[in-house]
Amino acid sequence: MGVCDAADFSLPSNHAALAFAAVVVIAVATRGGWLTLAALLFAFVVAIARMLEGAHYLHDAAAGALIGLPVPAIMAWAARRTRPRRLGRSH
């Protein structure tokens, strides 16, 4: 296991943020299910791998996850709120 340099500015882990953001994108696109679970497991593997490589501490990876999850979720929510409503066909 590697050791992070104390002078390194590694907060948050960008890899973890992107991996967890991808989970939200996949969840929105597929409406949940096994693919979302697989993406979530993969995101955890990415975060753990960054720590095992010595590139990040636990708090770096956790901060990346805490940023990666809500940002795309808020953006998806906002996109749905501002999307024009479909009008029914009138004959």
Image (tube, rainbow, N blue to C red):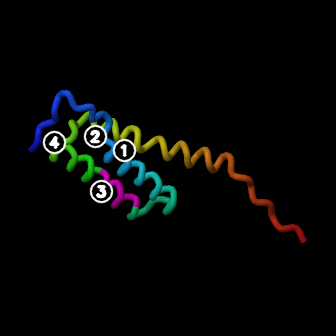
Q: On the picture, is 63 further left or further right than 76?
A: left
Mark 2 against mark 4, which lies toward the viewer?
A: 4
Determine the CA span between mark 2 and mark 3.
14 Å
Determine the CA span between mark 1 and mark 3.
12 Å
- Kind of residue sitting beneath label 4: Gly
- Kind of residue sitting beneath label 1: Ala
Query: Which quadrant of the rendered structure holds the C terminus?
Result: bottom right
Determine the CA span between mark 2 and mark 1.
8 Å
- Kind of residue sitting beneath label 3: Phe
Q: Which residue is mark 3?
A: 42
Residue numbers of the magenta segment: 36-43
Whether the residues at callouts 3 and 4 have beta carbons within 8 Å, the answer is no
| x 58%, y 46%: residue | 77
Q: Say which element carries label 3.
A: helix
Q: Residue 45 in the image: state x and y as whole percent.
A: 25, 53
Q: Give the vertical position of 52 relative to 86 (above or below).
A: above
Residue 40: say if magenta.
yes
Mark 1 against mark 3, which lies toward the viewer?
A: 1
Query: Mark number for residue 61?
Result: 2
| x 20%, y 42%: residue | 55
Query: Mark number for residue 54?
Result: 4
Q: Residues within 10 Å of mark 3 (few under 14, many from 20)?
A: some
| x 16%, y 42%: residue | 54
What type of secondary structure mainly makes up the magenta span? helix
Query: Which quadrant of the rendered structure holds the N terminus?
Result: top left
Query: Mark number for residue 17?
Result: 1
